Image (cartoon, grey):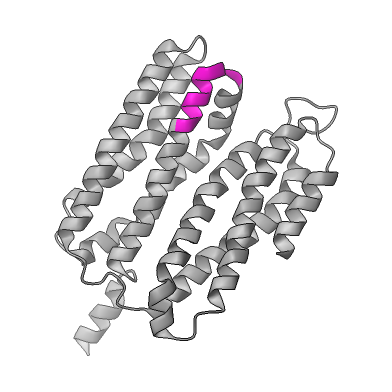
Amino acid sequence: MVLLVWVVVFAAVADVANPRVLLASAVSGGLVCACAAVGGVVATRVTGEESAARLRHVFVVLEGAALVLFFPFCWFGFGVEPVGRPGTFAAGAVLVLAVPVVAALVIVVRRSFVVHELVPDTGGGAPVQRIRVLATVLVTVGLALSAGVVAVAAVATEHQVVLLVVGLLVTLMPVLLGVRLMDVADVHSARRRNAGNYVVVPAAAGIAVFDFSATTGPAGTLFGVMAFGAVVLLVIAILVLRDFTGEWDRPWRDAGKVSR
């Protein structure tokens, strides 16, 4: 709650050139802090392994919501401009706003990991077929988003090439992850796919996503929606994979046990 109040108060008193962009960033960041606060309330009901197993999905949903909301927070944050200097980045204001949001995100993610550790067998026996179904969904929806990006770039009146390149880089990430998951032989091999790495490109493309969404009219807005859809898809895939596979493998520990 302290982190949430921090975001609200700073957004109310900060002086920037485009307050609406700051407000959009603050709203998404405040919702991340709210996820941390709600998770804290739910965490008071966890008294052991049985209650952790019963409430585990609540923490997964809160973690997913926080991870998804963090992207628009960053994307809007890239567009905050200082007073009197349009076109530049208000680094100080965004940094002050980012501190509580990043802290809240760490709290949410860490708490979800702790709950999974209390239920060590989470998803451990999930059939590989379900992981392959997830892979099919990733490829199908990812290709649909990529096709949408191509269509938007074709009708856009400016920045067509950059819209196409950036949009495909973002929307093809779920497709690549899905292709990697289609050949899993067992749950252990699914654990080694490093699904979290696939959100790096959407995160790095945040400045371009915001700029084109804000400056290219309806086509840009649709472009931003599809980029955000790819992020949502990736976050869901990461959380589902963790739910299926439990903790990540540590091959060096297994090798040590065998040698002894």
Q: On the rendered structure, is 235 left or right of 187?
A: right
Q: Is residue 116 visible?
A: no
Q: Which segment is the magenta one?
A: 215-225
Q: Is residue 224 magenta?
A: yes
x and y percentages locating residue 147 in the rendered image: 32, 24
x and y percentages locating residue 100 in the rendered image: 69, 58
Residue at 59% in and 26% down: 211
Q: Is residue 90 magenta?
A: no
Residue at 62% in and 65% down: 37
x and y percentages locating residue 28 in the rendered image: 62, 46
- Vertical comparison of 149 with 255: above or below: above
Residue furthest bottom as drawn: 260
- Assign the magenta stretch its main secondary structure: helix
Q: On the rendered structure, is 5 left or right of 37?
A: right
Image-quadrant location for residue 4: bottom right
Total numbered circles? 0
Q: Quadrant of the N terminus?
A: bottom right
Q: On the rendered structure, is 58 left or right of 128?
A: right
Nearer to us in this view, 47 or 176? 47
Nearer to us in this view, 17 or 38? 38
- Vertical comparison of 116 with 140: above or below: below
Q: Is residue 86 visible?
A: yes
Residue furthest top as drawn: 157
Nearer to us in this view, 151 or 47? 47
x and y percentages locating residue 80 in the rendered image: 72, 35
Q: On the rendered structure, is 153 left or right of 71?
A: left
Q: Quadrant of the C terminus?
A: bottom left
Image-quadrant location for residue 76: top right
- Vertical comparison of 240 with 198: above or below: below
Residue at 43% in and 81% down: 51
Residue at 47% in and 21% down: 162
